[in-house]
Amino acid sequence: MAADGADGTVRLWNASTHRRGAVLRGNQGAVTAVAFSPDGELLAVGGRDATIALWAPDTSKRLARLTGHGKGVENGGVLALAFGPDGRTLASGGDDRTVRLWDTREREALAVLEGHNNSVTTVAFAPSGASVASGGTDGEVKLWDVARRRLRSDVDSNPAQVRSVVFSPDSRLIAVGNDTGDTEIWTVEDGQYVTEFTGHADAVLTVAFSKDGKRIATGGVDRTVRLWSTDTSVLTLRPDAAQYRVAVSHDGRWIAAYNTHDESVDLWDLRTQRHVASLPDAGELTWDLAFSPDGRTIASVGEDSTLRLWDARSGRSLAVLDNHAGMTFDLAYAPDGRTLITGNNDGTVHLWDVRTRTRRATLDISAGNGLRDRRGRQGHLPGRRELRRDGQLWDIASERRTATLTGHTLGAITAAFSPSGSTLVSSGNDTIRLWDLDAGRATRHICDVVGPAVDRDRWRKLMPDVPFHMPCS
């Protein structure tokens, strides 16, 4: 282990015995950067004197001095060092606004990479050795092509001063720590933003990936070290188009996305991250998409009030069904895949037989109910009615309403069942609510709250859709 110092020395420590080893002297002024080669046979030391000294740690012998960096804008000299995976190529960043590549075996400069507008404070080699990343006080992050010795791309990161850059073990991602306390993650191949980790109260000084690339450790001026999970897949779909609606198959293998660029639905294989097919003529605006439970069919509804069915593998159109319901904003498959449900702004819900591709029934949920559209509008659409402040439960087999759930004061927008079907979650403009759908458990809870006797009026307020009886006697 090597520790640099303001007195121009580098102190070596034995990591196994925890004992201090040699003290290396030779820099004129403070030492500002140190880096070991991957095999530990070479130590590079940079200082405010704008030179890089190469040392053999085992013998404490100085092997060479590399010169070329100027004193720069702050007279900071060499501010950052990093060895490539070959153990021979060294990258340095300096106060003179340059990144330099060196051949440590031949003791010569390979390239001077210019482009930063201020001091370069951090450099990092990709594990593949193909790229070098640099960041500086100008708030810019640059990726350099090592073989061609030229700029590869700029990363559009936070303009705050960059304190640390590091590549993921597979060289696909780059993490950037900056003065705002944030750590940003970007793709190397195309410079796409992935995510951002916030939490430090001050600048992030150092960033490191775990060996498997699934975690990041960050250290900051706020005296904390934080661990973050990066275990997520990144897929960019049609960056030239807005993705208005997205659906994922039940097995997590496929994703369908409607894009506004050519008004089509694109199908992607998440395993290979490749585009598989496009579903043409999806309509002027697709409001919702859904995969069938077996993943073989995609259903879509759009602004033209038609329900479309597609083959999820080939993209072939299977059916176009006229909904005759004004505007349709929502659709869903029943878990058995035999029934498709569409919600309409005229206060009706249509049940479709998937096998015969015919409408089986229409449920009138209106009584003042209209469904909110996917853009959050609450009116001014032909045939719309006022948004209800309650939810309704219907039995599909009997086509009968079984319960009304009251509680939302500003309208219920969306709902979802738990996997067991015993709990419902609903959200509105006011709250998110959880509902217990186990009638026996709900009855017992009511009895515990209100006591042994419930009269008809109170029963009607609590459970208006359930016939009155005396459950608590």
Image (cartoon, rainbow, N blue to C red):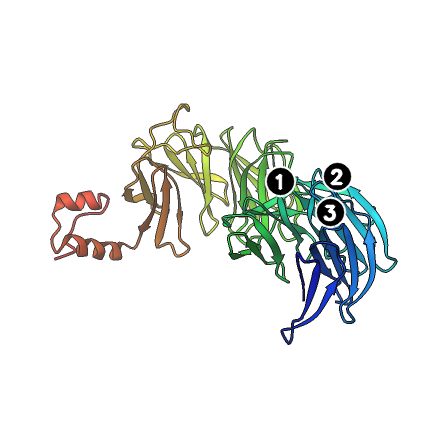
For marks 2 and 3, give the CA distance. 12 Å
Disc on the earlier residue, 2 or 1: 2
Q: Is residue 455 above or below residue 445?
A: above
Residue type for callout 1: Asp
Q: Nearer the viewer, mark 1 or mark 3?
A: 3
Asked whether disc 2 touches disc 3, contact meaning CB atoms under 8 Å apart, the reply is no
Tell me the distance, in whole angstroms, between the alpha carbons under discs 1 and 3. Answer: 47 Å
- Label 3, secondary structure: give it: strand
Q: Position of residue 163 (x, y in %)?
A: 62, 48
Quadrant of the frame with the C terminus: bottom left
Left of 60 or right of it: where is 309? left
> Which residue is at the front of the view, 305 or 109?
109
The residue sitting at 50% across, 29% down in the picture is 303
Q: Is residue 149 left or right of residue 30?
A: right
Which one is closest to the eye, mark 2 or mark 3? 3
Residue 22: horizontal and vertical position, in percent?
A: 71, 70
* Residue furthest bottom as drawn: 17
Rendering coords of residue 193 (x, y %):
61, 43
Q: Are marks 1 and 3 in contact (CB under 8 Å)?
A: no
Q: Position of residue 371 (x, y in %)?
A: 39, 34
**Which mark, residue 266?**
1
Gap between marks 2 and 1, in whole Å? 39 Å
Could you tell me which quadrant the N terminus lies in? Answer: bottom right
Q: Quadrant of residue 458?
A: top left
> Which residue type does callout 3 highlight?
Gly
Residue behind mark 2? 115
- N-terminal of the two: label 1 or label 3? 3
Among numbered discs 2 and 3, the one appearing first in the sequence: 3
Residue placed under numbered mark 3 in the picture? 94
